[in-house]
Amino acid sequence: MTATGTEVIFRLPDLGEGLTEAEITEWRVAPGETVTVDQNVVEVETAKAAVDVPIPIAGTVARLYGEVGAVIAVGEPLIAVTVAAETPAAPAVADPFADDEGRRAAERYREEERAGSGNVLVGYGTGTARRSRRRRAGRPVPPSPHRAPAPTRVASAAAAPSSAPGTSEASALPEESALSMAPALSIAPGTSEGPALPVASAPSSAPATSVAPAAGTPVRPEAPRVISPVVRQLARTHAIDVAALTPSGPGGVVLRRDVDAAIATAAAPGKAAPALAQAPGITASAPAAATGLAVAPEPAVHRADEGRTDDETPVRVPLRGVRRAIAEKLSRSRREIPDASTWVDVDATPLVELKADLARALPDARIGMLALFARICVAGLRRFPELNAYVDAERQEIVQVPQVHLGFAAQTDRGLVVPVVRDAHRLTLAELAARIRERTEAARTGRLDPRDLTGGTFTLNNYGVFGVDGSNPIINHPEAAMLGVGRITDRPWAFEGEIRLRKVAQLSFTFDHRVCDGGVAGGFLRFVADCVERPELLVAHL
């Protein structure tokens, strides 16, 4: 470390809701730019929604870990920031945190870091970082200029004048200091992942000496980093050794254009590929073994897409983010829930007329058909509470929920999501319509809070917007039921003894047969159908 600043790595924080990874969708900063506390530096997409990630430190961006489209796990490096040194250089100290005073100074440093940040991301806040597990009681001690509290890792430590060559008197940080540091921050030790060392500043008049590696330890240069699985697959497919490529991405990351350039060079007449993957059965050469880089041979198998043109090659789309969350949830629903379905055709002409009357009477309310069906569902669930429930498989219990948290299916560019309107039973029709509009807009822009995508007790699925009449939807696990609404279209219908064109729709109802039998399910669906055909019945159940 030099006197000009320290490089601090900010790692992807815990995003809450059990999320373990996120995909980078947009970087809001670039290397060399200055960032402030709580500034949003990157937008990431989780299995729930897209969120902005604020950074709890200020400084200059040194490098970005991962390009757009890369998937970063919680706890992995996200961005490195160079933080300016706030204290003058001091004589070398073997272990600045070796006594109680040093540990208290480190604790004060961490408190100051927390004090400047108040922005809260879902599941974590830069102003509510994890505190020390074992904070020692004691009177406040003024900061010492000879002790510079530091995060968990530093690049080097100055050797004491009396130290023998090749040795270092620096020791690892105490367990308390390592545990109490905020989990998303660490100091970048140059380009290697060496052991955690304390800060040991050297006098400005004497150059700092780095810790010498142990005898016989091979020096391992940093290999090019490939973050995107698409780039790795592309390199394997075309037998390109990424270790021989010159990375062009931030932080030494090999991008797709680097692999594409190598493929083009290999395909050019009279030119050889810059690097070919090692043939099967051949062991690593001596230089490769010395650098510690493992060579993974790929079996020589015939590829099904060899000899095909681009338009005949299968397209592989990674199953991740929202799409993977949908796949896992629906698969679990099919495995665990014995569902059954029932349906009925209804004359929705009175409900369509009611919508038109409300539009004239309350134009600002903007009450649509989805809000009307949502209001009907809430009334039906109050009459049939058995359906506002879920099955606790571990305790072998059916849990009926007193609150109605109504979810509705919304199709977005990122996939199908189910925003939830909490306490829908407490809302008026106009309030329910406003909440649905807010959730729909947030879902389409990817700005839904993960909390708004969980905790639903019943789902309304308006698949009629796709121009279809019926469907047999999969229940949104762990809920017990789902109402589906098909398109409303003109059909011949028996009305008052005559055949007339009426606005007809098909309603389908899918339910968990463990929670109720056909009598309850049929009663709920018939109640909904009656309210659609005679909306005045809603008044009796509000």
Image: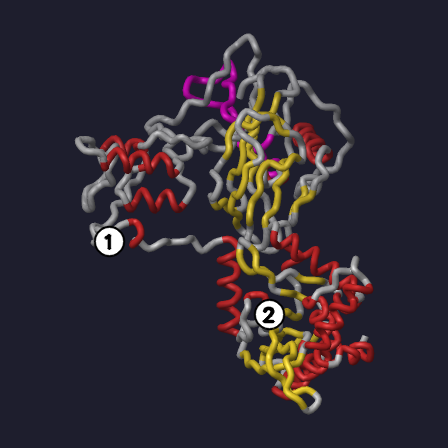
Secondary element at tag 1: loop
- Amino acid type at image mark 2: Pro
Residue 117 vertical position relative to residue 59 in the rendered view, above or below: below
Residue 467: percent from the left, percent from the top? 55, 68
Q: Residues within 10 Å of mark 1 (few under 14, many from 20)?
A: few
At a point 40% along the width and 36% down the height, the residue shown is 255
Residue 514: percent from the left, percent from the top? 59, 81
Residue 314 vertical position relative to residue 222 in the rendered view, above or below: below
Q: Which residue is mark 2?
A: 478
Magenta stretch: give its range: 151-177
Q: Earlier in the sequence, mark 2 or mark 1?
A: 1
Q: Quadrant of residue 370?
A: bottom right
At a point 53% along the width and 74% down the height, the residue shown is 471
Q: Which residue is mark 1?
A: 303
Front residue of 297/252: it is 252
Residue 211: percent from the left, percent from the top? 45, 23
- Amino acid type at image mark 1: Arg
Secondary element at tag 2: loop
Q: Residue furthest top?
A: 205
Residue 520 vertical position relative to residue 133 in the rendered view, above or below: below
Q: Is residue 157 magenta?
A: yes
Quick check: can you spot residue 171? no
